[in-house]
Amino acid sequence: MSMTAGLSLQTVSYAFGAKQALRDVSFAVEPGTFCALLGPNGAGKSTLFGLLTRLFTTGQGSITVAGHDLARQPRAALARIGVVFQQPTLDLDLTVRRNLLYFAALHGLAGREAETRSMAALDRLGMAERAGELARNLNGGHRRRMEIARALIHRPAVLLLDEPTVGLDAAARFAITDHVHGLAASGLSVLWATHLTDEVRPADQLVILHRGRVLANGTAADISAGKPLSDVFLAKTGTPA
Amino acid sequence: MTAALIALRAILHREALRFVTQRGRFIAALVRPLVWLFIFAAGFRAALGLSITPPYQTYITYEVYIVPGLCGMILLFNGMQSSLSLVYDREMGSMRLLLTSPLPRWWLLTARLIASTTVSLLQCAAFLGVAALWGITLPWQGYLAAIPALFVAGLMLGALGLMLSSFIKQLENFAGVMNFVIFPMFFLSSALYPLWKMAEASPRLRDLCAANPFTQAVELIRFALYGQMNLPALGWTLLALALFGGVALWGYDPARGMVQRKG
C-alpha cells in the first residue's frame, strides 16, 4: 500500500443495496497536488466524498489520509481532512468569525489559538475584513470562500471540495478555482470534484470517474493530448461535460 | 480543557445563539402550551373533577394539573423538531459538518442532544414564569427539583427524535411526525388526565398510557415540581433514554450509511 503523506485510495468499492456505486476505485493525491475528480452527475463523486469524510464506511478497499487508515484510525485521519461540502453548511444567522470559531471548537481548538487561526485562514482567502459580517449578508462566492477558510483552520493535509463552484457566477468561480490552486501549490493535497472541464488546468492531476469506475488518471495535459478536455471527456464517457 | 469539552461548549453556545436569533421559534414554542393552559384548561376545568392524589395534597384546579404535562409537551415538540430538522432541512449540512469532527460520533450526538435539551429547559422556564404570573405557582423547591427532571425527560425525548431521524424516511415533513408520534404520545399519557380517570374509561387504555415513556417523563416532572422524587418514573425514563439513545447511535453508525441515503 502506498503511504503517501496525502490522500490514497486502494480498490474502494461501495454499493447501495444492489446498486454498485463505486467499483475498485484507486488513486493517490500527493502533497502539493491539485487533483480534479471529473465525472458526470451520477458518476459516484458524492458517494466517494461520503466515504472520504466517513459519513458512511465500506468494507471493500482502504482509504489513507496523511498515512492514517480511515477505517482503523478514523479520528486521526479525520483530523487531517478539511472538507467543503456541495451544499452550504453555514449558520447564516451567525457572523463569519463565529462560524469559524464553532468549527475550530469541533476540532478541539479554543481561545486565542482558535481566534488566531480563524483570522489567518480568512486572511488567506482574502476575507479578513468580513469577519464581523453575518454569513447571510455575504454573496455566494464569499460564502464559499468562508467555507474554504473554515476547512483550513485545523491545518489539514488533505482538502476535499465537492463541486464547490456550483451556483456561482463566472468571476467568483474563477477566483475560487484560482485560490484553491494556490492552496495546492503551498503543499496541500487537494481533491476537487467537478463536472466542469474549464476548472481543470493542464498541469493538474486528473481522475475521470464514470459509472463508479476510474476511466483515466494522469496529468490533464497527458489525458487531453492536445485536444480540448471537454471532447476527450465526451469521448470517454459519452456524456458532455 | 479537553477537545471533547471544547466541542460541547461550542455546540451549546451555537444552540444558544440560534435560540436568541430565532425569536419566532421561541415565541411559537411558548404560545403552544400557553394556549392549552389559558383556553383548553379553562374550558375543561368544569368538566373534569380531580380527586386528591400524590403529589398533590389539596384539591387542585385543572390548570394546575396540566402544567407538568405542558412542560413535557415543550420538551416533546423541541426534541422532535431539533432532531428531525437535522434530516429534513438546512440542518443536514450542519450535521455533516458535525460528523466530520475527529471526536467520537456518540459524543458529538450527545453534545447535540444536551444543547437542544438546554434550550428546551429555557423554554420551560419561560412557560413556568408566565404560568406563575397567571397565579399558578409551585413550591420553590419544586422549581429547583424540576431542573434535573426536565433535563432527563428532555434528553429522553430528544433521543427519541434522534432515533426516528436515523430510521424513518417516509415521514417527509413535520405534519407526519405530529400525527404519528407527537399526538399519540401526548394524548396517550397522563399529561391531560390522570391515569385513574383513564381507567374509568378503559383499563386497556390506562395500561397503554402507563407504558408510554412520555407518561413516565410527565410524572417525573409532576412530582419534581412539588419537590418529590418519583423513582419508578425516573427509572422508566432513564431506561427509555438508554434504549432510544442506543438505537439512535446504532442508526448513525457510519457502517450503516443511513446518513448518505437521505442526503
Image: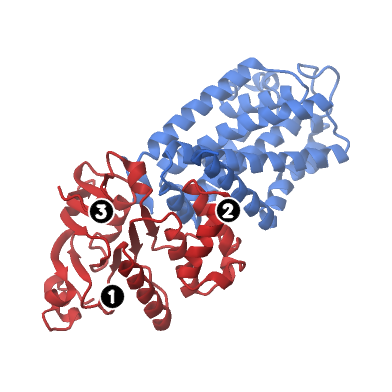
Chain colours: A red, B blue
Q: Secondary structure at mark 3?
A: loop
Residue B31 point in image, percent of width and height: 74, 48
Asked if residue A96 lies left or right of residue B261, the reply is: right
Q: Chain of mark 3?
A: A
Asked if residue B28 lies left or right of residue A203, the reply is: right
Is disc 2 on the same chain as disc 3?
yes
Residue A239 point in image, percent of width and height: 19, 73
Report the residue marked by disc 1: A196
**Mark 3 or mark 1, which has the lower sequence index?**
3
Q: Are marks 3 and 1 in contact (CB under 8 Å)?
A: no
Report the residue marked by disc 2: A112
Report the residue marked by disc 3: A5
**Mark 3 or mark 2, which has the lower sequence index?**
3
Label 1 Cα neighbours within 10 Å, binned few <14 / some 14-19 / many ≥20: some
Q: Chain of mark 1?
A: A
- How far is disc 3 from disc 1 in space, using C-alphas? 28 Å
Q: Amino acid at mark 2?
A: Arg
